[in-house]
Amino acid sequence: MKLKHLEMALQRLNGFAKPRPSLEQYQTPAPLAARLVYHAFMRGDIEGKSVCDLGCGTGVLAIGASLLGARSVLGVEIDPGAVEVARLNTGLLGASVEYIVADVREETFPDHLGPCDTVIMNPPFGAQKAHADRPFIDCALRVAPVTYGIFNEGSMQFIKAYTRGRAAIDEKVASALPIKRTFSFHTHDVQEIEVEILRLITMQ
Ligand code: SAH
């Protein structure tokens, strides 16, 4: 499947029925989601691999990984309502993803989850609650040797410092995230924010 076709497929997915600001529920727009999973695919981190999407929301990244030939994909999400939409979306595109409702902040959660080859995630940026992305990073580094995450522009230094001794950032792909007016405190119809896709390698 080509990048363009993946993007067109992901464009068809349903978004959050009732997005919850406290959970920073923004669906990754299809072009950015396709870019992350396609990039990971080109680097050999998707096809034939076991992939886990932390905070999978309505499933756009997880479904993308499945369409690109992941051996298995697991979506983890705290909000059962979002998982319902994700299941619907998975069927819509004939993908194969297993979902579990769970909180990545649970200390023992990574042990339950078990190891996988690749984590993909667009975690909360911490706009509503400071450091909301940290448990996602911690969990990813405990379960997978390779992680792709979408972060705010300029986060790289912070993430480098936060993961020192545990992971190395070996790639940064700059990208833009158009945020549609979702919550009442949004002042523009569409606002573009700069983001970066980081590839983290867990240290043994
Ligand atoms: N990955 C999806 C959703 C991104 S929004 C996409 O790319 O479109 C971030 C998601 O993380 C939301 O769906 C939110 O409900 C979920 N989330 C927030 N805190 C969480 C937690 N502690 N454990 C699991 N999921 C969480």
Image (cartoon, helix red, strand yellow):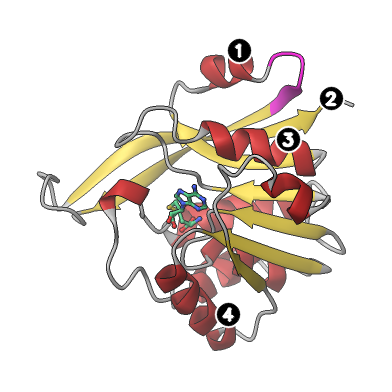
Q: Is residue 167 magenta?
A: yes
- Quarter assignment of residue 200: top right
Q: Position of residue 93 (x, y in %)?
A: 58, 83
Task: Kindly indicate whether the residue at mark 3 contacts the one at mark 1 (C-beta within 8 angstroms).
Answer: no
Q: Earlier in the sequence, mark 2 or mark 4?
A: 4
User: Label 2 is placed on what type of residue?
Assistant: Met
Q: Secondary structure at mark 3?
A: helix
**What is the spatial separation of the Cα atoms under label 1 and label 4, in whole angstroms?**
36 Å
96 displayed left or right of 22: right
Q: Residues within 10 Å of mark 1 (few under 14, many from 20)?
A: few
**What is the spatial separation of the Cα atoms under label 3 and label 4, in whole angstroms?**
26 Å
61 displayed left or right of 74: left
User: Label 3 is placed on what type of residue?
Assistant: Leu
Q: Is residue 17 above or below residue 161?
A: below
In what quadrant of the picture does the C terminus appear? top right
- Location of mark 4 (residue): 90
Q: Secondary structure at mark 4?
A: helix
Q: Nearer the viewer, mark 3 or mark 4?
A: 3
Q: Is residue 166 above or below residue 37?
A: above
Q: Earlier in the sequence, mark 2 or mark 3?
A: 3
Q: Residues within 10 Å of mark 2 (few under 14, many from 20)?
A: few
Q: Position of residue 168 (x, y in %)?
A: 74, 22
Q: Which residues are magenta?
A: 164-170
Q: Which residue is depicted at the point 52% across and 16% down?
A: 158
